[in-house]
Image (tube, coloured by chain):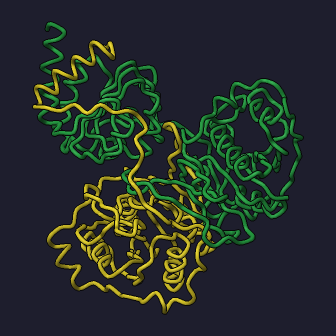
Chain colours: A yellow, B green
Amino acid sequence: MKIVVTLKQVPERDALLSISPGADWIDESALSFTTSEPDAYALEEALRLRDSQPGSELVALTAGPERSASVLRDALARGADRAIHVLTSSTHDPLSTAHLLAAAIRVESPGLVLTGLQSDDLGLGQTGVILAHLLGVPHSTLALHVEPVPTGIRVKRELEDGWFQHVEMPLPALATIQSGGNQLRYATLMGIKKARNKELRTIDAASLGAPAPPAAVELTRIFPPDKQKHTRTLAGSSAEIAAQLTGILRNEVHVL
Amino acid sequence: MSGVLVVLEPRPGSDPAALSRISLEALAGGLHLAQQLSLPCIAALAGSGSAVQLQSPGFAPLRAAQLEQIYAIEHPLLAHYTADGHTLALEQLIRKLCPEYVVFPHTYQVRDYAPALAVSLGQPLVSDVIAIRIEDGSPIFVRQLFQGRLNADYRVTHPGSAPIFLSIQAGAFRAESLENSNGPATAASIVSFIPQLTEAQIRTRPAAPFRESARTVDLASAPLIVSVGRGIGEQQNLALVESLAAALGAELAASRPICDLGWLPMERQVGSSGQTVAPRLYLAVGISGAIQHLVGMKGAKTVVAINRDPAAPIFEVADYAVVGDLFEVVPELIKAIHATKGE
């Protein structure tokens, strides 16, 4: 089976974010970037599936600016067989991103596409579902595990409040992966060495046909969140903070 | 007909079926938007017996709301949720009604099909909306970015003939006024809508939902909770928060990453995929506060947060904030609690 996994490059989780002068995005100049966490779990699930199905191939795919090639090099080091980078500067609209990914995937005609369920930056949670729609394949979201069955695949989906569900789909199909289904592997030194000889192909977005029309709704301003509560900040040494907090827990919250 | 169409869901597993709380909140959001824009508001519920459901006691708040009409989308193939069934059925209703806005509750089910539904009508979905403002007669939808560390305004910049789709996060609008209204004050008529669906169009085969094992921890009724997040760094450091929980006599809980890593069992997870809690005290240690976590603990009476990142979104909902190193503060706190208790 040929598997395509889509990956998105996002700022590191603990990066200090500052708003760009135009307030329409963040200032990216001093940031370091990584693979969006749910995509890392999608890659892990894809690697396990590839390894359990002899003769399978795993292709890692991203759409993004030049710097995002690093998520592909990382995927190759962790075990992906080859990688495709769709070079584009615009990744804020899930429909246009999905258009680019779909154009790159159609040529590959994989049996299975895995994506993360949402990105750590925009968090819209739509690219995977839109991608399935554009490819004309069935999909299932919030999947923790994907296993081959005679009729296609069976995914274990997470529902709300501790419930789960199995869903079966014929192939080709797409699943968006929820975090936590597996432990993530690290790239080994050997993996990093091997990755140097693997194919990483770059495609310019303009060569993939007409872009998606402009979205009807656009992100126009970024700002720090409002406080929802009046918050009292406790200051001082750790011992002083502990004393204040204990006093509050006894005299105001009445739990001590 | 133009207007605001709100698509509702019964609470999962409710028997007899009742409207979910987040659906009522989405309805409140839809009614707010409709009122601000002077548009009629319409509601819809999809299923195999939704007309009967809509007449049942669990749907009384919907019948009492200021609605123009309520659509019961009915088809035997909608008995069990599938993305294909819901997408096709709602696409047909939307093409018939031509609403200007379609509003959903931001549930797992909506996340599964609404992006495909919106794109089948050539439109984007503004997902996970936490607030709606009106400026110069146009709505602005606010949603979070970067796990809640920043907010963003989304505006309609290329209006077309197709509707704008949005899904509303839990807690963004208040459902109390809807819940407490008793009468069939307006008595909007319930109209049956039968979509055209064939079995061949439903490509996925869902099985019945299940739980892994019986829950042994009931966080929902715990009066005191100490909850731990990614800031704890290493599994071996959990002993520190376990001591804090023991000193306070609190239950230990966690945010998703800790359970994803297998450091604590899933049943101790607080948030949209875990348990929803409402303790007297919620002490968050090293939790940054992604929206999926906040929706599970916003009901806490008092929130204390300890985190070294002053921009962590957990501080937006905290009553008491400690910006500092948990590895320095927590040991002192344990000592001070023991001293206060005279132990």
The quarter of the picture where residue A61 lies is: bottom left
Residue at x 53% of width, y 63% of height: A126
Q: Seen from this angle, which residue lies furthest front?
A: B136
Q: Is residue B216 visible?
A: no
- Image quarter hosting the N terminus of chain B: bottom right
Q: Is residue B209 left or right of residue A22?
A: right
Residue A176 drawn at (x, y percent):
49, 60
Q: Quadrant of the C terminus of chain B?
A: top left
Question: For this view, does B235 lie left or right of residue A201?
Answer: left
Q: Which residue extends farthest bottom?
A: A207
Residue at point 38%, 82% (across, down) = A85
When the figure is inspected, residue B268 is found, relative to residue A110, above or below; the finding is above
Residue under the image location 41 percent in, 34 percent down: A229
Q: Position of residue B95 (x, y in %)?
A: 80, 64
Relative to residue B277, is residue B205 depicted above or below? below
List x then y, in percent, for residue B77. Answer: 77, 52
In front here: B343 or B251?
B343
Location of residue B224 by image quarter: top left
User: Looking at the picture, does residue A99 appear above or below residue B199?
Assistant: below
Report whether A129 appears left or right of A230. right
- Residue nearest the viewer, comparing A31 with A120: A31
Q: Nearer the viewer, residue A61 or B18?
A: B18
